């Protein structure tokens, strides 16, 4: 069953279908980028609230629900990082951290650890510009299709493919220059499908 | 709720369950709010103002560059099967992409723009063309490789005639294929004027197929910041 996105802002059942479809991957997305479980909880809540509040503006012809939601997620996380730099934490409509109990914190910490291990396989990420890294991570770490990743970042799919070509070249070049145990061969195959 | 599970097969954590309950409350609150279906006058007004300003700017450029009756682009097929695109103005990429599709060319057309170089990303300060494709190269480059897309770059190159106010793009008949995408970026006349005519390529292109892409002609102009 697929959620009708246009209805999730006012229909609880549509919201629940949408939430079930996406809660795992959105937690994984945030856990790959933020290391504090309380902030992960806040941001996951912020992302779903933003989705609920902008659902009426979703246009099916412009991409999949997944690409649309990852676009929201990318904006929310980027906004939080900017706020963190200014040391001004906005108060969200739903406070995710208020909902945490010790078991939930442990579960989020497991996700953070799992995503950190995956990121450590890709040391060449630091060689990429911020925009390229965001695209590369969506495809290589989050498993989005190129089309969905392009939609999430607001670029055309063909442009995204060209940028991925550049990213893979740079990550590969970085690996060649820093060949060591930090780059086991199976991971390299993942980078260049 | 029927025993929701996470990706590992475990049941939801109390956080995941509690968050859904909170979101359901938000949705209920929104559904009961009479303001939900009201138009957002400030946003619409702002968009209208921006739209009018942008339209005026486009109109001003069009009037100074070309007669108003000149179309933004034209697409034609020659007797030998080559598809010829004349781009007079960069203001209707969606229309151009649709017109190219009618001639069997799947394309994504964009604009080459000048962007400021982040000192952390390049030798700056200065400006360069975006979207650039291979920052390592300093000149145009024909992609080298053995894949079909790379072969297309060298065996069926696209010709681009750079004219004062536009471009004439000739796509060879043997390069036309619906299953691959032509990524074409063109610089506007004002961009070329800013960096100086003849000092930079005013276009770049690449072919993409599935998740693969091959840059054919790339542009990595670096120039002093405009006055």
Image: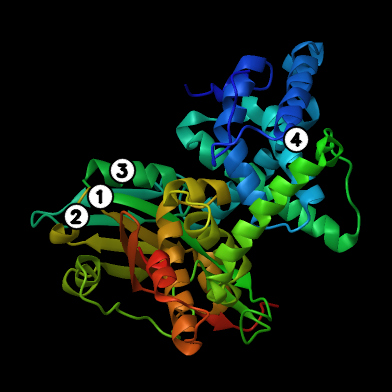
Task: Looking at the image, tell me whether mark 1 or mark 3 is earlier in sequence order.
Answer: 3
Mark 1 falls on what kind of element?
loop
Percent coordinates x, y for residue B224 in the rendering: 63, 84
Vertical comparison of A134 with B197: above or below: above
Vertical comparison of B37 with A114: above or below: above
According to the picture, the residue beneath numbered tag 4 turns out to be B15
Q: Are marks 2 and 3 in contact (CB under 8 Å)?
A: no
Judging depth in this view, the residue of B196 and A67 nearest the camera is A67
> Comparing marks 2 and 3, which lies closer to the viewer?
2
Q: CA distance from mark 3 to mark 4?
A: 51 Å
According to the picture, the residue beneath numbered tag 2 turns out to be B176
According to the picture, the residue beneath numbered tag 1 turns out to be B105
Q: Which quadrant of the figure contains the C terminus of chain B?
A: bottom right
Task: Looking at the image, tell me whether mark 4 or mark 1 is earlier in sequence order.
Answer: 4
Q: Is residue B157 left or right of residue B213?
A: left
The crowd level at tag 4 (other Cα within 10 Å; few <14, some 14-19, many 20+) is many
Q: Is residue A118 left or right of residue A53?
A: left
Percent coordinates x, y for residue A77 in the rendering: 71, 51
Q: Quadrant of residue B154?
A: bottom left
Determine which of the numbered discs, if any, sits on residue B16 in the image.
none
> Comparing marks 2 and 4, which lies closer to the viewer?
4
Vertical comparison of B177 with B7: above or below: below
> Comparing marks 4 and 1, which lies closer to the viewer?
4
Mark 3 falls on what kind of element?
helix
According to the picture, the residue beneath numbered tag 3 turns out to be B99
Task: Looking at the image, tell me whether mark 2 or mark 3 is earlier in sequence order.
Answer: 3
């Amino acid at each position: 069953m697929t959620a009708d996105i246009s209805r999730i802002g006012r229909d609880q059942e549509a919201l629940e279908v949408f939430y079930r479809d996406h809660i795992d991957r959105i937690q994984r997305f945030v856990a790959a980028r933020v290391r504090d479980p309380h902030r992960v909880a806040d941001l996951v809540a912020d992302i779903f609230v933003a989705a609920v509040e902008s659902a009426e503006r979703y246009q099916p012809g412009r991409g999949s629900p997944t690409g649309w939601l990852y676009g929201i997620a990318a904006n929310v996380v980027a906004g939080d990082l900017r706020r963190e730099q200014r040391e001004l934490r906005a108060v969200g409509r739903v406070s995710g951290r208020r909902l945490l109990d010790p078991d939930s914190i442990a579960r989020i910490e497991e996700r953070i650890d799992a995503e950190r291990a995956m990121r450590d396989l890709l040391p060449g990420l630091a060689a990429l510009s911020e925009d390229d890294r965001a695209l590369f991570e969506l495809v290589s770490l989050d498993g989005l299709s190129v089309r969905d990743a392009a939609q999430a970042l607001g670029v055309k799919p063909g442009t995204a493919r060209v940028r991925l070509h550049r990213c893979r070249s740079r990550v590969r070049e970085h690996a060649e220059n820093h060949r060591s145990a930090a780059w086991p061969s199976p991971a390299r195959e993942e980078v260049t499908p | 709720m029927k025993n929701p599970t996470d990706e590992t097969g475990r049941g939801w954590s109390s956080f995941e369950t509690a968050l859904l309950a909170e979101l359901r409350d938000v949705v209920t609150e929104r559904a009961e709010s009479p303001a939900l279906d009201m138009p957002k006058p400030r946003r619409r007004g702002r968009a209208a103002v921006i739209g009018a300003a942008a339209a005026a700017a486009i109109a001003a450029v069009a009037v100074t560059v070309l007669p108003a009756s000149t179309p933004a682009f034209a697409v034609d097929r020659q007797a030998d099967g080559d598809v010829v695109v004349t781009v007079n103005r960069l203001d209707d990429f969606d229309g151009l992409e649709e017109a190219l599709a009618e001639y069997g060319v799947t394309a994504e057309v964009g604009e080459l723009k000048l962007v400021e170089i982040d000192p952390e990303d390049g030798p700056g300060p200065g400006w360069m063309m975006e979207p650039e494709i291979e920052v390592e190269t300093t000149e145009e480059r024909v992609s080298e490789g053995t894949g079909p897309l790379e072969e297309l770059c060298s065996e069926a190159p696209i010709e681009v005639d750079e004219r004062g106010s536009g471009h004439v793009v000739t796509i060879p008949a043997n390069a036309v294929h619906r299953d691959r995408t032509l990524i074409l970026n063109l610089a506007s006349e004002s961009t070329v004027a800013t960096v100086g005519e003849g000092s930079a390529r005013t276009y770049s292109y690449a072919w993409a197929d599935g998740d693969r892409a091959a840059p054919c002609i790339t542009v990595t102009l670096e120039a002093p910041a405009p006055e």
